Image (cartoon, grey):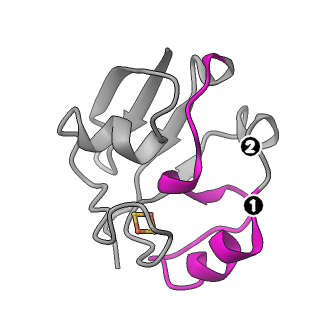
Amino acid sequence: MARITYIEHDGTEHVVDVPAGLTVMEGARDNNVPGIDADCGGACACSTCHVYVHADWVEKLPKMDDMEEDMLDFAFEPDMSRSRLTCQIKVTDALDGLIVNLPEKQI
Ligand code: FES
């Protein structure tokens, strides 16, 4: 279980307890957090689950693979220093306290 804070573009915070084994995207989807569309259902094929990871967490997350990096090119205003696709981040207990900021929109 990890407590994850999703911050909408307007500053609205959603603090959610996400079970280990789900993805950060699924944690948002299952708790009706707006702003993560996840159109492809987590197949790393749409980029609409894009977020900006809080600076304190960028280095703590598992590295992105080539497929995620390529797909991020299609996201809305990606920042390669902190952008990630949430469907590619598996939740573990180590992610307790994770903070992600949602972009203004998804593509
Ligand atoms: Fe489509 Fe993440 S849900 S890329």
Looking at the rendered structure, the kind of residue marked 2 is Val
16 horizontally vs 101: left or right: left
In the rendered image of this protein, does residue 29 appear above or below residue 94?
A: below
29 horizontally vs 47: left or right: left
The spot of residue 96 in percent (x, y) is 58, 17
Ligand 1 picture quarter? bottom left
Q: Look at the numbered disc 2 and say if its residue's Cβ is closer than 8 Å to ligand 1.
A: no
Asked where in the image residue 43 lies, by quadrant, the reply is bottom left
| Magenta-highlighted residues | 64-93
16 horizontally vs 53: left or right: left
Residue beneath label 1, please?
81
Which sits in the foreground, 8 or 25? 25
Magenta-span inclusion, residue 74 = yes
In the rendered image of this protein, does residue 107 appear above or below residue 83?
A: below
Residue beneath label 2, please?
58
32 horizontally vs 36: left or right: left
Q: Residues within 10 Å of mark 2 (few under 14, many from 20)?
A: some
First in sequence: mark 1 or mark 2?
A: 2
| Identity of the residue drawn at 48% across and 41% down | 23
Q: Residues within 10 Å of mark 1 (few under 14, many from 20)?
A: few
Asked where in the image residue 79 lies, by quadrant, the reply is bottom right
Callout 1 secondary element: loop
Callout 2 secondary element: helix
Question: How many numbered marks have been drawn onto this rendered protein structure?
Answer: 2
User: From the image, which quarter does the C terminus lie in?
Assistant: bottom left
Q: Are marks 1 and 2 in contact (CB under 8 Å)?
A: yes
The spot of residue 24 in percent (x, y) is 47, 40
Q: Look at the numbered disc 1 and say if its residue's Cβ is closer than 8 Å to ligand 1.
A: no
Per the model, the C-alpha gap separating discs 1 and 2 is: 8 Å
